[in-house]
Image (cartoon, rainbow, N blue to C red):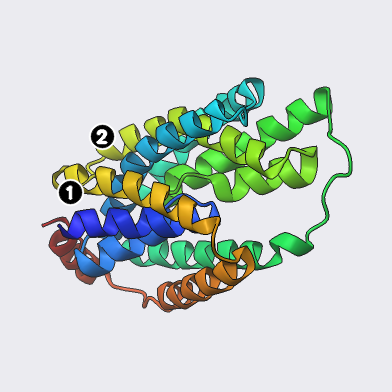
Amino acid sequence: MIALFIGLAAGFFGGLVGLGGGVIMIPLMVGMLKMGQHKAHGTSLVALVFTGISGAITYALNGSVDILASVLLASTAIFTARAGARFANALPEWKLKRSFGGFLIFVSLLLLLKSYLPHVTRPVVGWLEILILLLTGIFTGFLSGMMGVGGGTIMVPSMVLLTGFTQYTAQGCSLLAMVPVGIVGAYTHWRLGNVNKNILPGLVPGILAGTYLGGSVAHILSEGALRIIFSAVLIWTGVRYLRTPKLSTDEQLIIEERGDG
């Protein structure tokens, strides 16, 4: 039941502001289930693969997916996702927590500044568009594998601000691209033992239902107010993660054993 609640909360808040649920799911798994940070990242990525599939189908049915753009994004991201997952696995728990805290604050600032960022006045086409999408995929794949998130935080702004994609198309492309990328990252975490298989039966249905509910409510409430509330929660969580103390090797091993157990 706790896993179902975490999935619902992550999906709901993610659906409200157009993000994957990883930024909510990971802190909840660490705090409520006392899961190790590495295992929380890997488990989150497995769950988010299903969110990407569901979301991509929904956007495709509404004509908001550019297949070629999604393929270009995924073509480079699938390689760096594995590298990101391995890099996360090699980091000590306290370093991974601090990195995740910094990422949460970055996401928060991006959400708050979203309306004030300059957009490309007309769509970028040709080789420049291809280059931007390939480079975006490289960075996003690594970030996804390392942080256990879907990667839309980077993909969507890049497509909207740099290539002139509409917000809906950018989100649709991001969801579709992150399905193969998420699978690669999730598989790598799975092989490294960073996935809690026992909570997936509750987590996956929860995040799917939560995403649908959050997306529905988002059309009723003010997007600006939602962004401010959500960003405040993320900043508070991020600051807590950044203040994670540096631990000795012995202390680190004890915490990881407790989290994995």
Which residue is drawn at the image coordinates 65% and 25% (left, top)?
66
Q: Quadrant of residue 231?
A: bottom right
Furthest toward the front, the residue is 220
Cα gap from disc 1 to disc 2, whole angstroms: 17 Å
Q: Which mark is residue 191?
A: 2
Camera sees residue 90: no
Query: Residue 204's spot in the image, x, y percent?
Result: 27, 43
* Residue 12 vs residue 182, the one in the foreground: 12
* Residue 146 appears left or right of 201: right
* Residue 202 appears left or right of 237: left
Which residue is drawn at the image coordinates 44% and 52% (left, top)?
147
Q: Which amino acid lies under the numbered mark 1 shown in the image of this protein?
A: Ile
Query: Residue 18's spot in the image, x, y percent?
Result: 54, 52
* Residue 1 appears left or right of 64: left
The N terminus lies in quadrant: bottom left
Residue beneath disc 1: 199
Q: Secondary structure at mark 2?
A: helix
